[in-house]
Amino acid sequence: MQAIRQRVWTLKPRQRYGGAALLVSCALICTACGEGEPTQDEPDATSDTTRPPRPKTDRWKLSTLDVDFVGLNLRMATSAQGVVGVAYYRTEGVEGDLCTELGVENPPIKTNWELKYAQLSGDSWSIETVADAPFIGQPPGLDLKFNPANKPVIATMAGAPVVALRYCGVNNAALYTREGTSWQLDTAVSTSGAAASGDSSSDFGFVVGYWPALAFDAAGQPALAYRDVHAGGIQNDDFTRADLEFAYKRGASWSAFPVDMGRGAGNFNRMIFDAVDRPVLAYYNPTELTAEPRIGIWVTRSEDGGASWQRTQLFNRATSEGPDVLRHPQTGDLHVAFYNSQRGYPQLATLSDHDAFESVSAWKLDDIGNNLYDEGVTPSLAVNADGQLAIAYYRCVKASAGLGRCHSDDDALIFAYNDGNEWRHEVVDSGDAGGPCGSRPALAFDAEHRPIIAYRCDTLVDDKVETHVKFARRERLPQ
């Protein structure tokens, strides 16, 4: 069993108080990240300690989108008409009413989490509350896309508490669609047995919808990938035996299918439809089972609408957060970006031969980052109208300090794009406010083909760290 290290952020010395540095613990768990020592085929990070961090480029205009403990599970999308939307949860839950729905003596208190949506108009944002729902622990992910009618659609969890499990939290895989000035709820899946596998352990339970990924097919029908955690942690093996499942709406009804069952799969899911309208999922399996280890980054595809799945493993170690997946609109190539926790930088896996989907050797791996730094967590991919591929990701610290030991003197938001010959890198924001800055980036291109990024940035306000959502916009990429 590999050791587990928690990724920790340390604020700048000027912000120390009370005789101790303020430490901010990230929600990421990085297993087998290594000890920060350079390997034989990497440059020695300690040999260039005098090299200053690359300065921020003046091509980027930075602004604050929202403040006061916001930015959990941040996602951004652009519509076909160029509308830019951002969805996220608050980073802190609020105690609500007693959970009387359970009908028990001494019911637990609900912890409500506010789901927010922001839409850009010119240089200003309009922000609204989509839902305020109880969760057991932090909300596990969300996704945001625009449907063919250019309406924002948010994939998350909804549903009343489960009396049978004494579970006082939302538990269904669901969509919120903006209709005029209100948000309409569409429940896709409400029980584990909806995606029947024939295995009683996998088909038992009511808590579905963790880490939802949303995509629309060529006909405009929505599909969801999500994690099924059965009883939501009440049973000891709810998470180690979790299932990755897929739901597809055709017409007015949803159908659910098993994808990767009983092995703990389904964290940080991302999904697209490929050039011939097949669903492609990229996901992380955090579970290391003795009998059949499946830990790592996976990609899977269905050729029959979800009934069966092909899969391959792109990375076989524990890592922080998960991948992103993109279909190149001109070449049809599949691209999957992920953080290589062994090396401490992002990699891009590309598949051009779609008949060889299950062959690891058919996926070409490119190193994107700078191995002088530990960087690449939470990568976000996008492609512009000219076919230029771009990626945004978080920089943690100089590699010489040791992987996972994030420090606000060194962390940053990094943007990289391929100019046709090589990857060009830019520092977008280096966290001048002193707190961790640049995590959970969401990258897209706007209607003027300019790269835009929404991301989290922590700031010390009145001796308390607040998480803000920031927004960066760049001039167009050179042709």
Image (cartoon, rainbow, N blue to C red):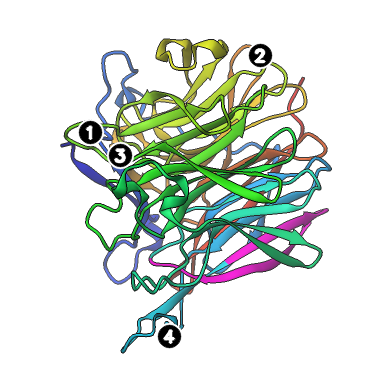
CB atoms of marks 3 and 4 within 8 Å: no
Q: Position of residue 428 (x, y in %)?
A: 60, 40
Q: Is residue 103 visible?
A: yes
SS class of the residue under badge 2? loop
Mark 3 / mark 1, whichever is N-terminal: 1
Badge 4 is on which residue? 100
* Badge 2 amino acid: Gly
Amino acid type, mark 3: Arg
Q: CA distance from mark 3 to mark 2?
A: 40 Å
Q: Residue at x 45, y 57 (%)?
A: 191
Residue carrying label 2 = 420
Mark 4: amino acid: Thr
Question: Which structural element holds mark 1?
Answer: loop
Residue visible at 49% across and 11% down?
356
Distance, label 3 to label 4, CA atoms, is: 34 Å
Asked if the residues shown at circle 2 and circle 4 are in contact, with their CB atoms under 8 angstroms apart, the answer is: no
Q: Nearer the viewer, residue 134 or 189?
A: 189
How packed mark 1 is, by other alpha carbons closer than 10 Å (few <14, some 14-19, many 20 or more), is some
Mark count: 4
Instruction: Please name the predominant secondary structure of the magenta segment in the image.
Output: strand
Residue 132 lies in the magenta stretch: yes
Q: How many angstroms separate mark 2 from mark 4 (CA)?
A: 60 Å
Q: CA distance from mark 4 to mark 1?
A: 49 Å
In this view, the mark in front (4 or 1): 4
In percent of width and height, residue 474 lies at: 72, 38
Q: Quadrant of the C terminus?
A: top right
Q: Which residue position holds label 1?
A: 35
Q: On the image, which quarter does residue 447 sit in?
A: top right
User: Horizontal and vertical percent for residue 67?
Assistant: 59, 66
Residue under label 3, please give it: 263
**119 vs 106: above or below:** above
* Residue 215 located left or right of residue 476: left
